[in-house]
Amino acid sequence: MQTKCLVRALIILVLFSCALAEAQQQNWVGYVTDTHCGTNCQVTKNMTPDLKCIRRCVKKGSKYGLWSGDKVYTLEPQAKVMQFVAKNAKVTGVMSGEKIRVAAIETVEMHADRKP
């Protein structure tokens, strides 16, 4: 009898934890840049981050990040965001401190006269 109650309680706890983790996912839109230059990255004539500048900074140890609003958030895992560098992207994930754990990422269109 106690075992059944314990198993039920464990199942409820697992389901509640999954629901809570799912609820923490958020969406952000911004440019994939690097954490060294951040919002001060060299920009192209379209006011988008410069791909060469970002790659150079990452080669020197910087991390890929998302420039959204006036902040740059570190993106993890790094390998998941590499193909989106210097592009405007929608990121879905969970934020922990200044880091976003990326669950999904996709490019989105943004007018050239708008900053992230």
Image (tube, helix red, strand yellow):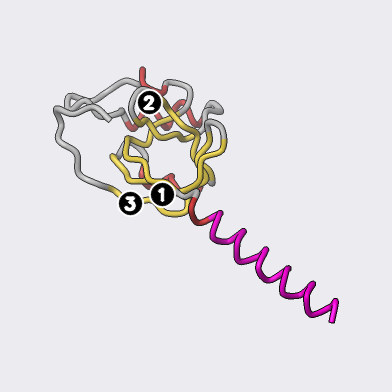
The dominant secondary structure in magenta is helix
Q: Position of residue 22 (x, y in %)?
A: 50, 56
Which residue shows up at 27% across the image and 23% down it?
43
Q: Are marks 3 and 2 in contact (CB under 8 Å)?
A: no
Name the element at disc 1.
strand
Which mark is on residue 106? 3
Which mark is on residue 53? 2
Residue 29, quarter of the rendered image: top left
Write the start and end of the magenta stretch as one range. Answer: 1-21
Residue 112, quarter of the rendered image: top left
Which residue shows up at 17% across the image and 24% down it?
45
Residue 74 visible? The answer is yes
* Residue behind mark 1: 92
Q: Is residue 12 rendered magenta in the image?
A: yes
Q: Is residue 108 rendered magenta in the image?
A: no
Residue 78 visible? The answer is no
- Which tag, 1 or 2, sits closer to the chain's start? 2
Q: Are marks 1 and 2 in contact (CB under 8 Å)?
A: no
Q: Position of residue 103 (x, y in %)?
A: 47, 53
Along the horizontal axis of the image, is 46 left or right of 58?
left
